[in-house]
Every structure is written in structure tokens, then in C-alpha cells.
Amino acid sequence: MNGAIMNLAAQCSSRLAQALIGAIMACAWLYFAVLHVRAFDAGGNPSYLVFCVTETLTAVLFLVRSAPVSVSPDPRDWALALGATFLPFLFLPSASAPVPQAALLVVAGALVQLSGMLSLNRSIGVVPALRVLKTGGLYRIVRHPLYASYLLTFSGYLLSNWSPRNLIVYLLSMALLAARIGREEAHLARDSDYRAYMARVKFRVLPFVF
């Protein structure tokens, strides 16, 4: 009886945590979206809208993702994953654009992100978790195409929206994503199918580089 009560409490706690994460993500996205829609209205740069659309897709797929087989219980993984997810919402539009053509990288990154998300579908997640293993589409080329898309998008955004604040957000985001890859693969590699996938697909983010 006590065991059943503890299991029920754990399930409720998990559901509450997921609901809180979803609510925080929604608020962060709303703040981010309002600023970038206003920036588009002011200057007509379509990359702002592209960025908003891809982040909206991230939020939607997060809310309808499938239940995991296993989730990392390590609080460091939770802190790292949530920090890497929410930090990019601190990017702000800037009038300084040292490389305005870099806005095209935002579009390219958005296309890669869209393709990767469609390949993942409801298997997308924030905290390292074992869900249905996806190996099709871009996942045949690199193991983390979504992170590749972030590299493109964030780099293009920084170069077309230069500010010390955006530089700090960019550097912290890249550091967190690099650490996140290591922690995520350490968890997923416990599964034999994922280890076989790692053996087939050698590169994590950039083909022939990393």
C-alpha cells in the first residue's frame, strides 16, 4: 500500500514538474515572440518571423511529445537541458548588423530545425530521455541535427543582431549545448540500439568535423 502511494506521488510530482516547465516555456516564448514580431514590424526583416515560427514549433512539439521509456534523474541534466532550452529566448533584436547577409543563416538553420523536428515528431524532449529512436532524415547524417540548426541560427542571429548581450547569450548557449550533447549521449548510450546507431553515424553535429 505504501509503495502504491509513493508511486502515485512520484507520478503526480512528475506531471506537476512537466506542467511547470511547459508554463515557463510558454511565458518565455511569448516574451521572445512579442519582441521579434515588433522588430519585424519596425524593419521588415523576415528572419525575425522565421525565428518565431521555429521556436513556436519547438514549444508545440514539446507539449505533445511522447512519454519516455527512461528519463535521466540527475538534477545536473535537468538544469543543463532547461538552461540550454530557455537561454536563447534572451536574444534581443539589435540595430547593429555587421553582417546583414547572415540573416540567411537564420533561415537555413530554421529549415534544418524544421526537418529535424519533423523527423523526431513526438520524440522531442528537453531533458535527456530515451524515447522512440529516430534514425531517418537528417539523423542519417548527424546524430544531433537540431543542435546543428541552433549553431546556424544563433550564429546568423548574432552576426545580424550584434550586441554585447547577444554575444554573451550566444557563447553561453553554445557552451551549454556542447555540454548537453555529452550528457544526453551518456544517458542514451545505455541502450544497445542507440550504441549501434552511434557506431553507424559517426558525427554529432557537423559532418566530418564534430
Image: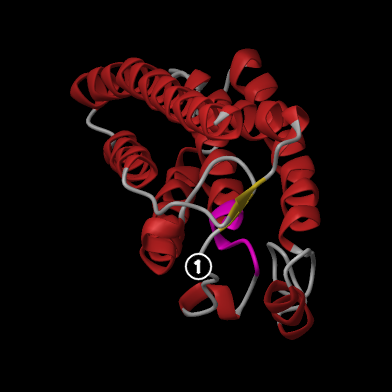
Residue 98 in view of the camera: no
Magenta-colored stretch includes residue 37: no
The residue most toward the front is 1
Residue 143 percent location from the top left of the image: 65, 68
Q: Which three-letter amino acid code belongs to the residue tagged 1?
A: Val
Q: Which residue is mark 1?
A: 132
In which quadrant of the rendered image does the C terminus lie? bottom right
Is residue 17 visible in the rendered structure shown here?
A: yes
Q: Main secondary structure of the magenta part?
A: helix
- Which of these two is toward me, 96 or 129? 129
Vertical relation: 179 (above or below) 38: below
- From the viewer's perspective, tell me whether residue 132 is left or right of residue 168: left
Instruction: Give the magenta range.
Output: 143-148
Residue ID at (46%, 18%): 92
In percent of width and height, residue 63 lies at 34, 40
| Residue closest to the eye, 4 or 36 | 4
Taking the image as shown, residue 27 lies to the left or right of residue 158, namely left
Residue density around tag 1, few if under 14, some if 14–19, many if 20 or more, within 10 Å: some
> 53 left or right of 133?
left
Name the one closer to the observer, 93 or 128.
Answer: 128
At 72% from the left and 27% from the top, the residue drawn is 172
- Assign a secondary structure to mark 1: loop
Name the residue: 43% across, 30% down: 15
Q: Quadrant of residue 60?
A: top left
Measuring from the top left, give residue 46's x and y in whole percent: 27, 40
